[in-house]
Amino acid sequence: MQDGREVNALLGQGSEFEGKLTFEGAVRIDGTFAGEIFTEDTLIIGEGAQVSAQIDAGTVIIYGDVRGNVRTTELLELHAPARLRGDITTPNLAIDRGVIFEGSCTMTDGGAPKVASGAPKVTATPAAETPAAEIPVN
């Protein structure tokens, strides 16, 4: 593995998922994900991954393509050939040469992400099961 962390779950290359992901431990995404990601732990987005999501995590390590805002309480690492289009809020930031970042960055002193207490190791809610907002039709 590129970063040496033990991974508890993997969304492999060629896999696609849309919805809300909440987990404990380390999760790696190498496929396509759209939705929301919440964890107090580590999210790794592998090279070739396509992620379109609001991310709220302890540590995020990105090698792939991310569209959406990223908030971490510990660390955000962007490693080439990563591409991030969105705003960053983090206390610690590392960006390698060759990374593309389009957005704004706010440096903070940390703070816990909002994750429901007693969350299971990995919970994924497909978008089809996520209630849609009601929009009045005129």
Image (spheres, helix red, strand yellow):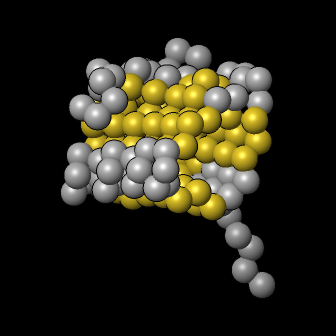
Front-most of residues 8 and 81:
81
Residue 22 as seen in the image, left or right of residue 113: left
Relative height, residue 6 to residue 97 (above, below): above
Q: Is residue 82 visible?
A: no
Quarter of the rendering containing residue 50: bottom left
Instruction: Give residue 1's position: percent from left, percent from top.
Output: 24, 31
* Picture coordinates of residue 20, whole percent (x, y): 49, 44
Residue 36 placement (x, y as % from top left):
54, 46
Q: Residue at 59% x, 48% y: name it.
A: 54
Q: Is residue 105 left or right of residue 57?
A: right
Query: Image point 61% across, 24% down: which residue?
Result: 74
Q: Quadrant of residue 120?
A: top left
Which residue is nearer to you in this view: 80 or 75?
Answer: 80
* Quarter occupied by the C terminus: bottom right
- Nearest the viewer among 60 and 136 is 60
Farthest residue to the bottom: give it: 138
Q: Going by the image, does 121 lie left or right of 76? A: left
